[in-house]
Image (cartoon, rainbow, N blue to C red):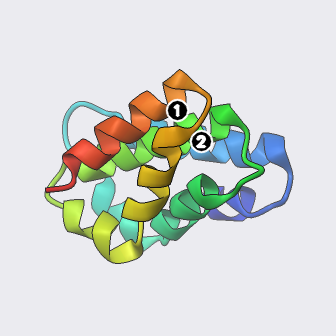
Amino acid sequence: MYALDMRSGDAARELEATRAVRKLLSVERNPPVEQILTHGFLPFLIGQISRESASPILLYEASWALINIGSTTHTRALVDAGATLPLIHLLLHPSAEVREQCVWAVGNIR
């Protein structure tokens, strides 16, 4: 369901789907990272942070989800999927909150 909402073209649905995925990844013990990757959410998250027209809150939520993926043993998935350059590009974003999330996400890439 969330994958369809992430690419719906409706900003509110995309934001809510992204937030829902981020919340799933934010659980303290055993976040479902493998399931998120298996169901193909990573390309959507990267696509969202790559869009020039994305709202700061969408960028914030998508970047936070990427932080949660990068803080696990699946860090390499971020690199392989091409998250590094969009995250680095967002370090220049006007929103301090977006920049902070991107710094954390890039910092998880080792």
Label 2 sits on residue:
59
- Return the mark for residue 60: none
Of 83 and 4, nearer the camera is 83
Image quarter in which the N terminus is found = bottom right
Give SS at disc 1: helix
Which mark identifies residue 98?
Answer: 1
The residue lying toward the viewer, choosing from 98 and 6, is 98
Q: CA distance from mark 1 to mark 2?
A: 6 Å
| Residue 62 at x, y percent in the picture | 53, 45
Residue 68 seen in the current view: yes
Left or right of 48 on screen, residue 103: left
Screen quadrant of the C terminus: bottom left
Bin the neighbour count of mark 1 within 10 Å (Cα to Cα): few under 14, some 14-19, many 20 and up.
many
Residue 6 position by quadrant:
bottom right
Cβ–Cβ under 8 Å for marks 1 and 2: yes
Amino acid type at circle 2 is Leu
Residue at (60, 60) in percent of width and height? 50
Q: Relative to 57, does residue 38 appear above or below in the rendering?
A: below
Tell whether 69 sits left or right of 59: left
Q: Residue at x 59, y 27 (%)?
A: 95
Mark 2 neighbour class, 10 Å CA radius: few under 14, some 14 to 19, many 20 or more: many
